Structures are given as structure tokens and as C-alpha cells.
Amino acid sequence: MNGIDNNPASLDPTFWLKLNAAMEELRTVHGYKLYIVETRRTPLTQLLYFLQGRLSMFAADNKHIVQEYLKLRSTVGLFPVSETDAVNKKVTWTLDSRHFSGTAADIGFIGAVPQGGWDRVAEVVEKHGLKSGHRWPQEDSPHVEM
């Protein structure tokens, strides 16, 4: 698998039932329009996410390494990022993700995030027995896991 997998069928069935119930509640009760950004990841995808924000050691003297990193992201079908974000913006803190087992997903809002939207998402997914990355010290609001 290359690129971003956003197919719910890729998820662990128990996790998907809980996530789907939470997303349905957020839609029907709170009027939130959400979608699944990403489900399973390959180790290569996770490595590329992990390297993002950790390329500063190459930015000054070895700019070509940053350019190769950006090309590799594109080649495997990941969302494009700016050179600045590639060097400075960390998006994950682990190489061992629950995305590997299908027990994590990233979700997003269609349109603007409503005031307090991620707080409400965290509340509802937790009510359905899941964990929200919005509550973590290194906040990852779109991340939901079992």
C-alpha cells in the first residue's frame, strides 16, 4: 500500500464500530461534518511522518536532503508539505504507531473547525471507549485510537 489509506475497511472491526458510532453522534447530535483522513499506515509512511520536523540538521548545509525527503513523500503519495514544515513541524512522536494495526485513525472536519470542536470530538470519542490525541501533552487533535 502506498499513499494515504482512508478506507474504514482497513480498520480493526471493533475500533471501526466505536469510531463510526462516535462520528455518527457528532454528526446527528452536534451537527459536525467529519471525514476519515487516514487509517492504516505502512512503516515507510510512519517513518516519513516521524522525519518531518526533524530535518533541521540538514537544512543549512545539506539542503538537497530536504528536497529528496519532499520528493519521497510525493512519490509514496503523502500530502505535500512546505520545506519549512518538513524541517520544523513535527507531526508524530513515535515510530510504533497504532495505525499499523488498524486501531487508530485520523479524522478531520469538512470546512472550518467549530469553536471548541476538538474538545467536543475528544469528549464524544472517549464516551465511546476510545482515546483522543487532543488530550495528549503533544496534542494531536485529529488522532483517535483504541
Image: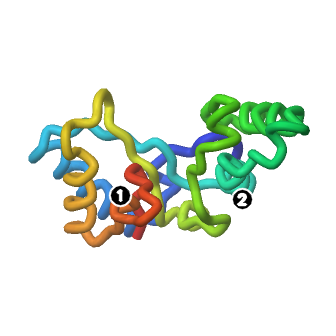
The kind of residue tagged 1 is His
In this rendered view, identify the residue nearer to me: 36 or 51: 51
> Disc 2 versus disc 1: distance between alpha carbons?
23 Å
Quadrant of the image occupied by residue 127: bottom left
The chosen color scheme is rainbow
Under tag 2, what secondary structure? helix
Where does residue 36 sit, x and y in percent of width and height?
Answer: 41, 44
Q: How many marks?
A: 2
In this rendered view, identify the residue nearer to me: 63 or 116: 63
Where does residue 61 sit, x and y in percent of width and height?
Answer: 90, 38
Quadrant of the image occupied by residue 58: top right
Residue extending furthest toward the left: 29
Can you tell which mark lies on residue 39?
A: none
The residue beneath circle 2 is: 43
Give the foreground label among 2 and 1. Answer: 1
The residue beneath circle 1 is: 134
